[in-house]
Amino acid sequence: MNSAHAADMPELRWASDGEANVPYVFHDPQSASRLEGFEYEIVEALGARLHEKPVYIQNDWEGLIPGLQRGMYQMVLDGIEMTPEHKAAALFSRPYYITGERIIVRRNQTGLDTLGSLRGHTLGTIKDTLAERILLREPTIMVRAYEEESNAFSDLRNGRLDAILLDGPIALYYGAVSADFKLVGEPIGRTEYGIAFAANNTAERDKVDAALGGLIADGTLHRILARWNLWTPQMANAFNDHTQPDVAPVEWDRYRAAIAGTGGFHARIMRYIGFLPLVAHGAGLTLLVSACAMVLAIGLGVLLALMRRFGPRPIGWLAGLYIEIVRGTPLLIQILFIFYGLPSLGIRLSPFFAGVLALGLNYAAYEAENYRAGLLSVPRGQMEAAIALNMTHMQALRLVIVPQAFRTVVPVMTNDFISLLKDSSLVSVITLTELSQTYVRLSSTYYDYVGTGLLIGLAYLLLGLPFVRLARMAEQRLGRGMNAPHGHR
């Protein structure tokens, strides 16, 4: 397919959470900027059959279905179980994968190979899954539910868990590639994965469902799954396909080789060097979002402080109400409301502008209180003296009061900006891949939390240090200006 023809094809926009999602959709350990996975290949095959160009949209797990309802993309593939709860929120295609839950234990453990043997132990799993529901039915099992499977395996390795119960593909690709773990027992239960669509998008669902049926009928799906070592007797029975195509598990072998080849000091150093473009991209986005949000926060914060300090009583009351509401509600809720809630009111913002707006409106409330404290620190006689010199009220504020107040709040503003840099990590929930999300992606792909964490921490530190230096310079300049002799009085 030539590039000109591909450019003319309609888009098939789809979403998944590819940050820690082996083997569904994830970043190639040998090339961290490249996406792969068995679901990724299924969508590519669907696109070829539909003569549409697949366009991948990264979204956090919790935002996948809300993103469908918001119209950000046409469909979602992310190992979504076709449960009654999920079917009530979205339309689903026919199943494209059927699996069971598997038990994973440490290599030296024995005797925990059945559901009954797990009673009285501490088990880890992924939240809102069939595995979690199975474990919760056993009152003697202490269940710990995780957002990311990599965190569960870390706790199993460190002895915080006795075992893990997870979907078959996750168990295979996390448990069977490490010398620390092993899969035990037979599959438990039955889980069906389906492609999710918006509740009112029946036409799109039917079109893709027909294409998926074609991939099943001609063996394309079988061959994709065989390449990833995911064709199982359970799949053969469910799809009534007992053929044995001559397809080697090349992607499974390649993934195991890539993970096995990530050890050694020199290999680690070279890998960290390879991370630098991704870290630089994440740092650039973090800085851009934070800087734009801080400009908004400063401007709105000054306005709110002046309204509360010098405005008429009703205006001051409204400014105070805004400040208390914003400071009294979590920033994450505000981000989700602006991005997913406002479209129901006809206001649709891009992820970038939604993130900037949420951070800016939130920090404006805190900046307003800082500026109000600065304004209160200026003696009342300064305003009276300015008025006596025939200045208008606005001139007195602009030329006398605000400059003096600003000097006292510069250090606090610097601290707030550094805090905003770190809080910008929350915009990852609305599809923005900044530094913290880059850390999740890299650490979960390579099972390297220490080195990758130090690298991302260094990036945050380097972003913040110049602003600390600039603030000190500004303090010194303002201090000289305020303390300079003004001649005879």
Image (cartoon, rainbow, N blue to C red):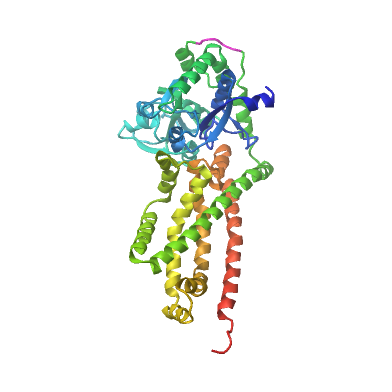
351 within the magenta span = no
State the image coordinates of residue 489 (x, y, percent, origin top left): 54, 89
- Can residue 178 be seen here? The reply is no
Decide which of 447, 110 is in the foreground and name it.
447
State the image coordinates of residue 157 (x, y, percent, origin top left): 49, 39
Image position of 332 with respect to 228: above or below: below
State the image coordinates of residue 104 (x, y, percent, origin top left): 46, 31
Image position of 281 with respect to 232: above or below: below
Decide which of 210, 281 is in the foreground and name it.
210
State the image coordinates of residue 448 (x, y, percent, origin top left): 57, 42
Image position of 434 with respect to 246: above or below: below
Which part of the image, by quadrant, shows the N terminus? Answer: top right
The magenta segment: 241-245
Decide which of 100, 346 is in the foreground and name it.
346
Q: How many marks?
A: 0
> Predominant secondary structure in magenta?
loop
Q: Residue at x 40, y 41 (%)?
A: 345
Q: Residue at x 33, y 62 (%)?
A: 314
- Can residue 307 be seen here? The reply is yes
Horizontal arrangement in the rendering, residue 288 relative to residue 64 (left or right): right
Q: In the image as oriented, which residue stretches furthest toward the left? A: 139
